[in-house]
Amino acid sequence: MTMAGYETGHDQHLCCGDGHAGRAEVEHGVLVTPRKHTVVLGVADPLAAAHLRRQLINHPRFELIATAHNAVQTLYAVEETHASVVLMADDSPGLRGREVLADIAAASPDTYVIITTPGDPAVLVNEPGVASAVFENDVYGIYAALDQLADFLELPKAEIHERRASQDRRLHQDWSKVFAERRAAARRDAPVTGT
């Protein structure tokens, strides 16, 4: 099925609640398997997309529900599906992946982004909404990031919100420190004028 330029898996997955899975539990003597975490894949390169699609289809904790071919289509897919995870490339045609991160966070605040990049992943780690940044050719790094995110998503919701709030406070403190250092440097380097 195709909607707004991206491909979706099955119709029944478009309205899947919060898209989050949980640990397997026993209810009334029956093992209940958790739902998988839903994923939107946003990668323009056909070979990389095919490889990542295979990884996601074979991953026991994730279910691919939509595939997009650029950052804007990825945003549309997130707006429609409210997937729990977006796996996207930073080097998409048109807008770069990092340019739609704020829009993804606004459209679906409970969606976490794993972004791949041809450059240094450390540059993207502190971008808003990024759960993990990985070098685009690091297959094991992408799989490890997916597993780490699945572990995080299976924590109790209260703990997830506390960890996210803690990370937001840390980022705010980091930027406040950077701005304070820049102001101090500007004052120090400012020319002294006499009257």
Image (cartoon, grey):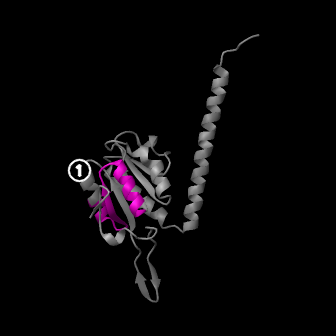
Report the label total.
1
Q: Front-most of 151 and 80?
A: 80
Q: Residue furthest bottom?
A: 28
- Where residue 159 sits in the image (x, y, percent)? 57, 64
Residue pictured at 42% horizontal, 58% vertical = 79
Residue pictured at 41% horizontal, 75% vertical = 34
- Where residue 49 sits in the image (x, y, percent)? 27, 53
Q: Residue furthest front?
A: 4
Q: Which residues are magenta?
A: 54-82
Q: Which residue is mark 1?
A: 46
| One can see residue 5 in this view | yes
| One can see residue 141 in this view | no
Q: Quadrant of residue 143?
A: bottom left
- Where residue 111 sits in the image (x, y, percent)? 46, 59
Q: Residue furthest top?
A: 195
Relative to 129, say whether 8 is above or below.
below
Relative to 173, say whether 49 is above or below.
below
Which quadrant of the rendered structure holds the N terminus?
bottom left
Relative to 67, say whether 19 is above or below.
below
Relative to 137, say whether 149 is above or below.
below
Q: Front-most of 40 and 115?
A: 40
Q: Secondary structure at mark 1?
A: helix
The amino acid type found where label 1 is placed reads Pro
Asked if the stretch drawn in magenta spans residue 188, the answer is: no
Crowd around label 1: few <14 · some 14–19 · many ≥20 (10 Å):
few
Which quadrant of the rendered structure holds the C terminus?
top right
Say left or right for 111 vs 187.
left
Residue pictured at 48% horizontal, 67% vertical = 154
